[in-house]
Image (tube, helix red, strand yellow):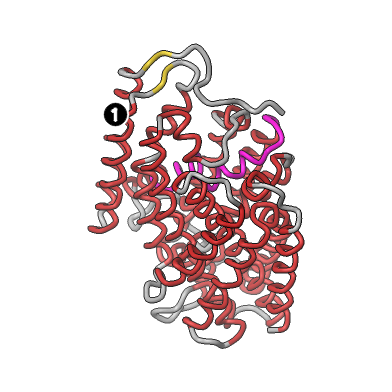
């Protein structure tokens, strides 16, 4: 418990120190736009390896086996594609947020639509991270779920309120190291203590529990969010140049393949060697029953670091989008107030709902179906044509609406259909748009 307190105090202290260096909105949101490729890669990795990638993926692997790899594997492909295709272009844009970029590409109406979607969806994702953090805090402290949720959520929220993006990125490198050491040592200990399963491991990436349609859904709805997403873009916007942006995206994508396989293998071990009681998460059960105390403690902090690094990025993304793109301001004090409010709204949103994967899939379905197709197409065409504003707005509304319906009825078909329709409408938006002779987005002059 004492280490948990020291961990929290250390991060809050860092946030306080960084708060004194925040001179303007750019410092708070973009951390000075001077980050190198290693820091960008570490921050991207720390941001995407959160609740779903630890507690959620181990649980999925325990149930469906090796295909659980695709939860993060699809994201790794998305990050590699980001590095190959648009990271360089994104690093040249003089914008603060994804919604800011949407306005420059597609007009004010599209910015408002995207801003609302980002704030609502990413606040929900923050809530999912808080649920996972509460599981860890409860395991360490013995407190109940609601007490742990308030403590964990309040800590992450205050840390973000103080330091903004600079504090988040400073701690990401350390948090990646903690994750890697905790997961790596756990994986070695488990298989070293039992050996491989008697009948071996089925390494098939598709099976009867996870077929081609599910794989397609993961690639489109989960993986696309790593190619085009406000939290991912926020990291690329902090890069000091094109090389840092591209190498950061490619490096994080390659490392994410390794993380995905390693995390899944922990779930595979549980599938063969333990019986997890109903209602309990496989990773939490392993921590309590299969690891020595010192290693369980190390893994706990590795997981907590993963969750904190993902939650803080998502919270800063939501709050700065609200301040800059809904309130149309660049006031640091107000951005901090919004961060505080959204942090506690996220706590309230998951007060009773503790299903991490379900929360995340619903959130991804809304954003990825409605926003990704028109935004990706408009970025690729930004030096040639500008989309028709009415048509792009229609693409966002229809796609996001079908994504939300998909989550409500729990049928992934509608999310994929919504993404397809949004993409087709977006192509029409380009056809009926206006030709341009240079980028429609203002470029950095530093």
Dominant SS of magenta comes to helix
Tell me the SS state at disc 1. helix
User: Which residue lies at the image location 61% right of the left edge and 59% below the top edge?
Assistant: 309
Q: Is residue 238 above or below residue 258?
A: above
User: Residue lying furthest left in this view?
Assistant: 409
- Can residue 199 be seen by looking at this rendering? no
**Toward the viewer: 445 or 301?**
445
Q: Is residue 222 magenta?
A: yes
Please state the total of marks drawn on the protein image: 1
Indicate the position of residue 16 as horizontal and vertical percent values. Answer: 73, 64
Quick check: 163 left or right of 356?
Answer: right
Residue 304, above or below 204: below
Queried whether the magenta region covers residue 110, the answer comes back as no
User: Which residue is drawn at the image coordinates 38% and 32% (left, top)?
Assistant: 374
Q: Quadrant where the C terminus lies?
A: top right
- Where is the N terminus found, in terms of image quarters? bottom right
Q: Position of residue 271 (x, y in %)?
A: 47, 69
Of residues 361 and 90, the one nearer the viewer is: 90
Q: At which x and y percent is residue 11?
A: 71, 67
Q: Nearer the viewer, residue 383 or 142?
A: 383
The image shows residue 341 at horizontal and vertical percentages of: 49, 65
Would you place residue 92 above or below residue 70 in this image? above
Q: Which residues are magenta?
A: 220-243
Residue 153 in sight from this viewpoint: yes
**Apparent side of residue 245 relative to residue 59 in the rendered image (left or right):** right
Q: Name the residue located 41 percent from the left edge and 28 percent from the top edge.
A: 377
The residue where tag 1 is placed is 391
Q: Residues within 10 Å of mark 1 (few under 14, many from 20)?
A: many
Answer with the quarter of the image where residue 234 lies.
top right
């Amino acid at each position: 418990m004492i280490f948990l307190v020291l961990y929290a105090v250390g991060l809050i202290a860092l946030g306080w120190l960084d708060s004194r260096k925040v001179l303007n909105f750019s410092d708070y949101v973009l951390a000075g736009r001077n980050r190198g490729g290693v820091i960008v890669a570490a921050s991207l990795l720390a941001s995407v390896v959160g609740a779903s990638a630890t507690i959620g993926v181990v649980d999925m692997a325990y149930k469906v086996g090796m295909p659980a790899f695709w939860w993060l594997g699809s994201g790794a492909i998305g990050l590699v594609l980001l590095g190959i295709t648009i990271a360089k272009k994104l690093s040249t844009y003089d914008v603060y947020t994804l919604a800011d970029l949407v306005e420059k590409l597609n007009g004010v109406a599209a910015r408002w639509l995207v801003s609302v979607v980002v704030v609502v969806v990413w606040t929900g994702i923050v809530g999912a991270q808080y649920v996972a953090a509460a599981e860890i805090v409860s395991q360490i402290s013995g407190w109940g779920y609601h007490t742990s949720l308030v403590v964990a959520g309040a800590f992450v929220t205050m840390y973000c309120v103080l330091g903004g993006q600079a504090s988040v990125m400073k701690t990401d490198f350390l948090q990646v190291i903690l994750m890697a050491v905790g997961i790596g040592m756990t994986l070695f200990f488990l298989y070293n203590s039992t050996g491989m399963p008697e009948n071996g491991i089925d390494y098939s990436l598709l099976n009867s529990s996870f077929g081609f349609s599910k794989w397609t859904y993961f690639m489109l709805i989960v993986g696309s969010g790593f190619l085009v997403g406000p939290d991912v873009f926020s990291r690329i916007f902090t890069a000091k140049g094109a090389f840092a942006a591209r190498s950061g995206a490619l490096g994080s994508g390659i490392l994410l393949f390794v993380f995905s396989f390693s995390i899944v293998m922990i779930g595979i071990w549980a599938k063969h060697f333990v019986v997890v009681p109903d209602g309990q998460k496989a990773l939490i059960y392993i921590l309590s029953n299969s690891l020595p105390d010192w290693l369980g403690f190390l893994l706990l902090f590795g997981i907590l670091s993963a969750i904190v690094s993902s939650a803080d990025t998502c919270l800063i993304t939501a709050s700065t989008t609200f301040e800059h793109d809904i309130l149309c301001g660049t006031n640091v004090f107000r951005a901090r107030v919004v961060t505080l409010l959204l942090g506690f709204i996220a706590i309230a949103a998951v007060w009773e709902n503790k299903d991490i994967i379900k929360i995340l899939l619903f959130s991804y379905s809304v954003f990825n179906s409605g926003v990704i197709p028109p935004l990706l197409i408009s970025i690729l065409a930004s030096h040639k044509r500008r989309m028709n504003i009415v048509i792009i707005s229609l693409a966002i509304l229809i796609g996001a609406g079908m994504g939300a319906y998909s989550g409500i009825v729990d049928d992934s078909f509608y999310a994929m259909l919504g993404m397809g329709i949004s993409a087709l409408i977006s192509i029409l938006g380009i056809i009926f748009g206006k030709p341009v002779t240079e980028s429609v987005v203002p470029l950095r002059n530093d």
